[in-house]
Image (cartoon, rainbow, N blue to C red):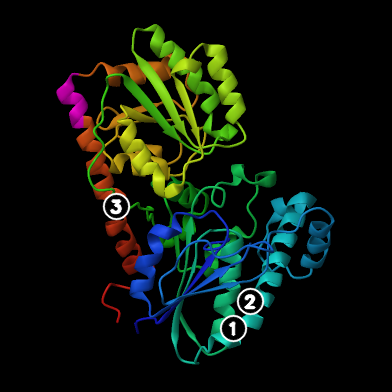
Amino acid sequence: MVCPSTLFLVTNSYPLGTGEDFIENEIGDLAERFGRVVVVAVQTRPGDVITRPVPGNVEVIRAGGPRPAGRAALLAAARGLAHLPRGSWNRDTLRDPRRLGLEAMFEEHARDTEADLLAQLPALGLRPGSHAVVYSYWFLDTARVAMLLAADLRARGLVVDKLVTRAHGYDLYPERSPLGHLPERKLLLDAFDAVCPISQQGRRTLTADWPRYAAKITTHHLGTADPGTPAACSREPFHIVSCSYLLPVKRMTRMPGVLAELRSRGVDARWTHIGGGPQTEAVREAARDAGVADVTDLRGHVGHNEILETERLLRPSCLVNLSSSEGVPVSMMEAASLGIPIIGTDVGGVSEIITDGVNGRLVPANFTDEQAADALQRLAELPDSEYTAQCTAARRTWERDFDQAVVYPRFCAEALGAPRDVH
């Protein structure tokens, strides 16, 4: 295959506004392996500006906007009914008018976005016969736009060598979506050359639901940068750290009860949470109710570039994650890179980071306070040599499976067809 010269990366908003921070770890490898990278942000809002630096050969364009809501969504659905591709829906969709409306709105929004993008393509100076790869960061709105973009590029005489998408969580698991339904799954799976869930659990789910596409579904983890010297973890006192945006799915309102249970067993435990969010006051109130407010430190928002150093300075004993649903949490990857043992609920791809009893402990998804406290207590009471071994194992897990210097070159070569020596 002729090495592709242009990569189209379709994102929700990166590098404008906030969000999709993970792409910051990947963009350097993409820019190194393609002569030109065009980032297409398709869900930005008026007033959004570029907030993250990009390499010199990366261009940024924006098209479309957020999905319509309210009356605008109804109008989009009405228009979209005429545009639904044949075979993109099934009998279950037809039996539920709400799902059919979601399909129609989804399709119309993608077409509107692509029309906006199509008007901007001539300015890019693309030459017929040149090669390109189209890469969607999500397996939902951006994927449908990427599919339409690939068709438009081919119509202009370009050779699209690969059409690739990642799949994370909300864009992969129907139960997390409105109406328990993800639109146009078959249409997308038919079109893409490679679908890359970020966890083995995601791959298993997708192949179980769509076995005929198993050959094109492969796991490619996200990765984080090497923070250098590991943290000097300490258990005097037993310092529990957590890091997340405080939403109900994170279940951090449960942590004060777990902390109180652990302290009642004679463990000198305290807890620091990094991150703000809508449940901040609920967590603060839970800490007061559990009688652990004096050993709870809610740090609030910490800039992404400062999180690792903050964790290092805390000299944590472990990182805890109590989520009811996860992909493969970046907070866990980063903690593992610092050599911090992890306690986490056995949901999503968490078990791809935590090997129970080796670099932390797994807790049942529907845990009791006592079960979570048991896992923490076991870590607190390990002999020093065994605790040190768990810290070392955490770092080794990161080096093998989540080091961005390993996983992104592998993704570029295997999924995008762009090895390091393309130039």
Placement of the N terminus among the 4 image quadrants? bottom left
Residue 36 location, quadrant:
bottom left
Residue 188's place in the image compared with 365, above or below, is: below
The location of residue 155, given as percent across then percent down, is 58, 86
> Residue placed at 52% from the left, 22% from the top?
254
Whether residue 290 appears in this view of the structure is: yes
> Residue placed at 40% from the left, 61% from the top?
215
Query: How busy is the neighbourhood of tag 1: few (under 14 within 10 Å), some, or many (20 plus)?
Result: some
Q: Which residue is mark 3?
A: 403
Q: Are marks 1 and 2 in contact (CB under 8 Å)?
A: yes
122 or 419, nearer to the observer: 122
Q: CA distance from mark 1 to mark 2?
A: 7 Å
Residue stretch rendered in magenta on the structure: 383-389
51 or 251, nearer to the observer: 51
Q: Amino acid at mark 3?
A: Asp
Mark positioned earlier in the residue sequence (2 or 3) = 2
Q: Amino acid at mark 1?
A: Leu
